[in-house]
Image (cartoon, rainbow, N blue to C red):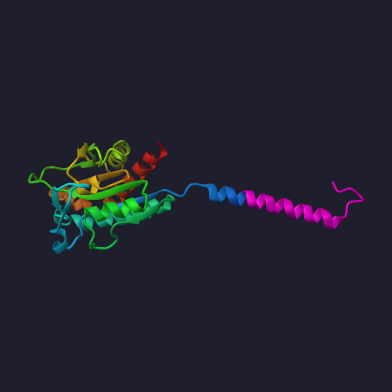
Amino acid sequence: MVAADEPLDDVAELLVEREQRIDHRHTLAVFAQPPTPLICLDPGHGTPPAIGRQTEPIGPGSRVMKIKDGGGAPGEAQVALAIGLKTRTLLRRSGFRVAMTRSGPTTTLGNVARAHFCNVRHAALMIRIHADGSPDPSSHGFKTLYPALHRGWTDDIYAASLRAAGDVQRASIRATGALDLGLFPRDDLTGFNWANVPAVLVETGFMSNPRESRLLKTGAYQLKVARGLVAGTEAFLRR
């Protein structure tokens, strides 16, 4: 209520000041919100052979050298990219920021550079997307790899990576109906040993299995895999 002897101009000024204070508090609240998590997708392979044959240390300070990219199973690089692109679309729809180590058929990045790509972006999770191969054409199923515990290399990301691997594996099996091959720790993967952010590697199926290879090359199945990866990511980040 306005008193009869209170100038209307003064009241207007008070109302403006009040609105400005409210706007200022709202602006501070918006800026105080944490940034949207960034997910780093690393579709495997796609490195030209001349670069892939080059070697790099398997881990920081190591004298053990590994090639940058063995090329993967026939057709794996294309499948990994297709799944990666679909996963990026779904992650963005869910409100995540996404970075990809490659979004085209080739890249010059070796595994050290791919890990660094995700590290410098402070990714909430690095998902390395692959497909498996085996001399036994009957081998099939889906598995998730995670960094083995190695002091000085992976001890800072081990626990979170293991949690992420479990979440991603469970969600992917639900989404695809694939055979659940479980979780596998690995100490011999350069991309894990150089990572400073939680990291997992999904083997989405066997390119050496005729039925699974056909499935992996279809857009419908790639979308199922992508949905599983997104659901697993969301479950991990809810913890």
Task: Look at the image and tell me whether residue 219 can be seen.
Answer: no
The vertical placement of 182 against 23, above or below, is above
- On the picture, is 23 further left or further right than 229? right
- The segment highlighted magenta reads 1-25
Q: Which quarter of the picture shows residue 178?
A: top left
Name the residue at the right extreme: 5
Question: Residue 151: x percent and y percent?
Answer: 24, 37
- On the picture, is 18 further left or further right than 65? right
Assess whether residue 18 is covered by the magenta stretch. yes
Q: Residue at x 31, y 35 (%)?
A: 159
Q: Residue at x 23, y 53 (%)?
A: 112
Q: Which quarter of the picture shows residue 163?
A: top left
| Quadrant into which the C terminus falls | top left
- On the picture, is 30 further left or further right than 118? right
The main secondary structure of the magenta stretch is: helix
**Viewer-proximal residue among 125 and 84:** 125
**Viewer-proximal residue among 217 and 65:** 65
Question: Residue 186: x percent and y percent?
Answer: 19, 40
Question: Residue 3: x percent and y percent?
Answer: 89, 48
What count of labels does the image hold? 0
Task: Look at the image and tell me whether residue 3 can be seen.
Answer: yes
Question: Residue 142: x percent and y percent?
Answer: 22, 42
